[in-house]
Amino acid sequence: MRENAEKISEVIDNLRRIFQAINDYSRTAEQFTGLTGPQLWALKILAKASPLRVSELASQMYLRPATVVGILDRLEGKGLVTRTRSMKDRRAVDLNLTEMGKEVVVKAPEVAQVMLLKGLNELSDEQLLHVVEGMTQMVRILGAENITPHPLHSS
């Protein structure tokens, strides 16, 4: 019983650390840039691979296109992103950074989402499977299987 209590304490402490790290990174990003973590993450992706379509950006952010549109609306309103009709396909819209958007990316701190993706991509297949299984079990324990996930710390 004592061994379980120690393991449970470790799980709870690690969850607290994860939440704290995400909040700290988001708070730093917001203080430094005035942007949320997801907004800054979108800018960083566009800096590496623009022009992109909304669906491509959503895929790289592991979000639904409708969620990304809301992020883009705020970024466009701040003058950091442009949406223009594709010259190749007039039905499509290309996303690009403005000069101001490029400046923000160069000066911006790292965001938790980028660190998470980098770390998860570096895991072996077996390690990643263990993470997936553990996280799935945590979701099940919390009865959160039917909750629609939203971006980490978004505004």
Image (tube, rainbow, N blue to C red):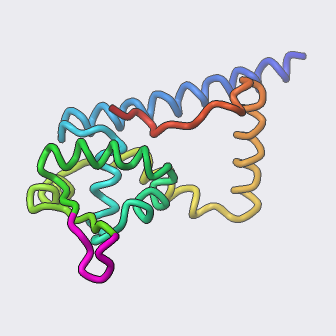
Q: Quadrant of the N terminus?
A: top right
Direction bottom: furthest residue: 88
Residue 126 location, quadrant: bottom right
Q: Up-down: is 56 above or below 30? A: below
- Residue 87 visible: yes
Query: Is 43 left or right of 142, judged from the image as shown?
Result: left
Question: What is the span of residues highlighted in magenta in the rendered image?
Answer: 84-91
Query: Would you place residue 138 above or below residue 110 in this image?
Result: above
Give the side of residue 79 with respect to residue 47, left or right.
left
Q: Is residue 49 visible?
A: no
User: Residue at the spot x=53%, y=56% of the render?
Assistant: 119
Q: Is residue 2 left or right of residue 39?
A: right
Tell me residue 115's x, y (percent).
Answer: 45, 52
Residue at the spot 19% in from the left edge and 49% down from the top edge = 76
User: Which quadrant does the C terminus fall into?
Assistant: top left
Of residues 2 and 102, the one nearer the viewer is 102
Front position in the image: 148 or 41: 148
Q: Magenta span: helix, strand or loop, mainly?
A: loop
Residue at (21%, 66%) from the top-left corner?
84
Residue pictured at 68% horizontal, 27% vertical: 10
